[in-house]
């Protein structure tokens, strides 16, 4: 009986360690995603018509799989983590994102 209790406690500890390790990895990807969304939004806000900038798919913050602009927000998908909250941008110009080979090109129009 004592062995069963000890085994259950050990299994519980191992499961808890696994969950904490996984939660940390998911949280880190979320932070990287938010950083990229904010960087893109700030660049868009500072840009004037005729400017464009590139975001490489293989980024320091992870592999960027998609950039979307809708409803006044920037959504960036990083390492398979879907963007759900987005980050607002306040550019008074039209902004378009085009995917090219290994990068995304963000262009600002008047």
Image: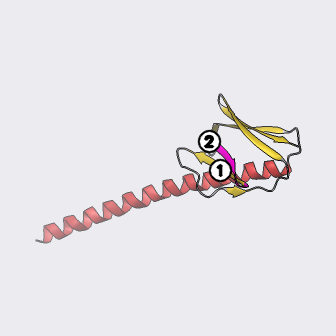
Whole-percent x, y for residue 8 in the image:
22, 66
Residue toward you, 9 or 30: 30
Q: Which residue occupies 66% across, 46% down? A: 68
Q: Label the magenta part by its dominant secondary structure.
A: strand
The residue that label 1 is drawn on is 75
Asked where in the image residue 7 lies, by quadrant, the reply is bottom left
Which mark sits nearer the N-terminus, 1 or 2? 2
Answer few, some or many: residues within 10 Å of disc 2's Cα (few below 14, many 20 plus, some between 14 and 19).
some
Q: Is residue 90 left or right of residue 23?
A: right
Say what secondary structure mark 2 lies in.
Answer: strand
Badge 1 marks a residue whose secondary structure is strand
Q: Is residue 19 above or below residue 74?
A: below
Q: Where residue 48 sits: x, y (%)?
A: 89, 45
User: The C terminus appears in which quarter of the rendering?
Assistant: top right
Q: Is residue 4 magenta?
A: no
| Residue interval drawn in magenta | 64-72
105 left or right of 5 in image: right
- Does residue 7 sit above or below 97 in this rendering? below
> Quick check: 43 left or right of 17?
right
Residue 77: horizontal and vertical position, in percent? Answer: 59, 46
Q: Which mark is residue 66?
A: 2
> Is disc 1 in contact with disc 2, using a CB cutoff of under 8 Å?
yes
């Amino acid at each position: 009986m004592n062995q069963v209790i000890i085994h259950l406690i050990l299994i519980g500890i191992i499961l808890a360690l696994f969950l904490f390790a996984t939660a940390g990895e998911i949280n880190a990807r979320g932070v990287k995603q938010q950083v990229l969304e904010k960087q893109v939004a700030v660049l868009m806000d500072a840009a004037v018509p005729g400017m464009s900038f590139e975001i490489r798919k293989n980024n320091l913050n992870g592999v960027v799989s998609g950039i979307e602009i809708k409803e006044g927000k920037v959504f960036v998908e990083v390492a398979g983590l879907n963007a759900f909250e987005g980050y607002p941008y306040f550019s008074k110009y039209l902004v378009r994102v085009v995917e090219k080979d290994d990068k995304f090109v963000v262009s600002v129009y008047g």
